[in-house]
Image (tube, helix red, strand yellow):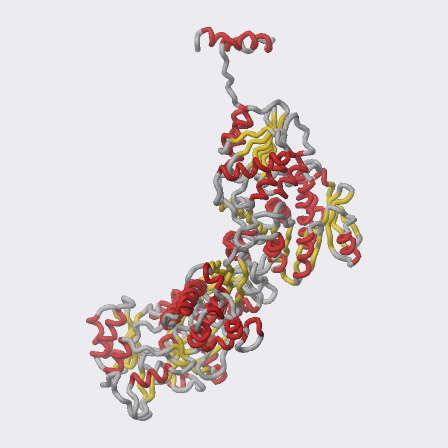
Amino acid sequence: MKGPNYWSVRRHKLIVMVLDLEEMEQLPSDKIDGFSERLKAMFPTMFSHRCSVGEPGGFFQRVDEGTWMGHIIEHIALEVQTLAGMDVGFGRTRGYGEEGVYSVVFAYMEERVGRYAAEASVKICEALISGKEYDLTDDIQEMRELRESDRLGPSTGSIVEEAARRGIPWIRLNKYSLCQLGYGANQKRIQATVTSETSNIAVEIACDKEETKYLLEQAEVPVPRGEIIRRERSLEESCRYVGYPLVVKPIDGNHGRGITVNINSYDEALVAFREAKNVSNSVIIEKYIVGEDYRLLVINNKLVAAAKRTPAHIIGDGKSSIQQLVDKVNDDPRRGYGHEKVLTQITLNELSLTLIKAKGYTVDSVLKDGEKLILKDTANLSTGGTAEDLTDMVHPANVFMAERISKIIDLDICGIDIMTTDITKPLSDTGGAVLEVNAGPGFRMHLAPTTGLPRNVAAPVVDKLFPPGSTSRIPIVAISGTNGKTTTTRLIAHMAKMKGYKVGYTTSDGVYIQNRLLMKGDCTGPTSAEFVLKDPTVDFAVLESARGGLLRAGLGFKHCDVGIVTNVAADHLGLKGIHTIEQLAKVKGVIPETVLPDGYAILNADDDLVYSMRKSVECNTAIFSMDENSPRIKAMQKRDGLSAVYENGFITICRGEWKMRVVKAVNVPLTYGGKATFMIQNILPAVLMGYVRGFTLEDMKTSLETFIPSASQTPGRLNMFHFKEFDILLDYAHNPAGMRALQQFTNNLEATKKVGIIAGIGDRRTEDNNQIGAIAAEMFDEIIIRADKHLRGKTEEELIAMVEEGIKMTDPNKKITVIPSEEKAIKHAVKTAEKGSIIILCSDVVPEALDLVKKLKEEEATKLYEFTKDDIPNLRKDDENGVHTEAELFLSKEK
């Protein structure tokens, strides 16, 4: 899970593992000799797990009393992540609805770590059951490495966290550090500490150290003497010009790569030059300025932090070897793997060994008491360096200089490296100099300095991207329900478009950006929602959110402004652990629970399960009903609440007991002259949405009157095709509730004969398919049973038998034709259609069915009739004007 979900609306990052205990279902923990003792020995820190007992040691108590392995695996998965430095605490284990099968749910920080923990926890539990030895070391290290590989870096992470604290939504755009803050047209982007507002020219200048130095020199900013060379033969002359000690660094390097400092001989310079050439073609030879290394961070032309940086080092005690001293430093609990803690552990790499050797030592050498040995040539925290915050001690002259430099280079986020003996004095007094100006500077040293005050340097970045009065969001309307959600989605999108918004919306047939279909297929999951929210042209999102995506990964957004639930009916039961209609309602209920406090949950008052969702929301509530005298509507009106009803033929909004009639239902094309009452149920929540979003009654009336149901506007939703002698009605009705709604409509249609083309659905229960057949027997004079294109785990024969059984339960004498191919079934119905009849096609692959019906319609319009000699007398008789005499002529010539 990556968003609000069935298991938790607030805890978004969850692993859901479906676990079959097999024979272990009969063996709880107290039935396995020594299991509890082995568990406690492997995980003594699990004592802190309170479990349902509610106190430390509670989980161990449950294990001693006897609990099932799914519950234990949940706790192991949580604990191994904690041991790897990711402290996660939420978990629960619930029955899946099948004997011995459980949903094991637990939190994660990084997805790949969570998946690894799921698999590892099962292996660990199996080892504990069998009494086999199991070493956790490799698992913990693997999870640490996965976290470092996948997590956002400290700088990006701090900006994202600051944005999230302010309620600004964010989306990670790639597996690196490119992130989007905000949605749609109001989005901004960051990549580490480079933003979508960072000047490209400024970054180019900062990455070109020669250009940077030139501009600073021209502006009378103190910089060290130096020059740039490209060939080794120029090195000796350059060293003489600059003078020792000197620094060698690549011209376009960053994060300390290829830099060597305090060089005092040509031989040292030669090694350093070759190292720098591995990073860049051009190399800077620069005077080494004596002093300490300071980083000044300027954001939006204001100094926000300053830190003194010290390279990774050790201090001798006269007894310990260099390796032992490094180990002691790494024992500091503040040091960890990669970025997991405030400080990073020191590793002795090839560069470290070179520096040690240059001092005449090996890793086994013992340093004198108090002797300091530098182990890295740069002061980066990522290589084990330390940082001391000195923001409040920087001399005003140095503050002025730093802020001026940010404007000279024109960088919105600017890291300035200074070498000086005393930051409390002007550089002009200490002989210090500006060494570099960095685009995309790291924030870690300021967020969590080794000593001194941590600085929230992410805050001014977010201030700059979203200044007071701006917004990061776009309106989001989310729609769920068993039936009607696609039509409601399309209608709301049309209303917003008519209001002047640039709308992006998702449906069960695709994703649309400004009415252009950009993705085809069932696009009602989180990926499709993110597709819309990432689009920079969209300023209004309408997102159909179906059960499948919610159970597969959660929602693709954390909050919406309006959440609509149309209805809840028995559909897809028995799938993904959802076995009852109450569980299904809980899935759909995630939508209104994500509505922002000042937003609206719009609920169907005629549906008990939907109406009860009002109890779990933390926002405003509006309800709708087909019955203006509904006690629930009356109660809402007495509370001066908001509702919508169908009364006296009108679509009406009620504020308290005051009525605001929007339009007569018969004047709304979507209702087919008022015959499609279930379409009125889709219109009511749409007008409530319009009202709470500030649409005028006239806006809504115009939108409803211009929303024409058709194969292009509402594909698969009551699409009527008029042929010369019969009609075809195509609809997506695919469950008993949908069939009942369709029945109400077709009962109002005049036809000499009603022929239904229906199918059983593979991921429905037998009783659901029986009921589809039973309803069809009531609706149609003749039934053609076809097979779905997607069988979803069942065979054609099984599905056809289920539907046929339902038909015969209602009407044993009903005429039934079985034609598994949908294309052949449609063509058969057309070929045998009686004059004045209607063919009602219930299709699951709507685009293909629509294409075929359209093709048949076109063929009818351009049909070439064939005649035989036997037809000629009849042709003469039927056609007094003799139009068919040419047919007779052709036949006489045997054409």
Q: In the shown orientation, is residue 317 left or right of residue 714?
A: left
Where residue 311 sits in the image (x, y, percent)? 35, 81
Drawn side of residue 797 relative to residue 665, left or right: left
- Can residue 296 be seen here? The reply is no
Q: Position of residue 252 (x, y in %)?
A: 33, 68
Percent from the top left, x then y, of residue 706?
65, 40
For the C terminus, give its image quadrant. top left
- Compared with 681, 888 (above or below) is above
Q: Is residue 171 above or below residue 714?
A: below
Residue 823 visible, this orientation: yes
- Number of marks in picture: 0
- The foreground one among 369 and 245 is 369
Along the line of sight, the residue nearer the viewer: 568 or 725: 568
* Side of 110 relative to 490 (left or right): left
User: In terms of image quadrants, where is residue 562?
Assistant: bottom right
- Decide if residue 81 is on the left or right side of residue 581: left
At a point 64% along the width and 47% down the height, the residue shown is: 495
User: Viewer-proximal residue, 23 or 387?
Assistant: 23
Task: Out of 67 and 568, give the one closest to the viewer.
Answer: 67
Q: Quadrant of residue 94?
A: bottom right
Image: 817 above or below 887: below
Q: Position of residue 816 (x, y in %)?
A: 57, 30
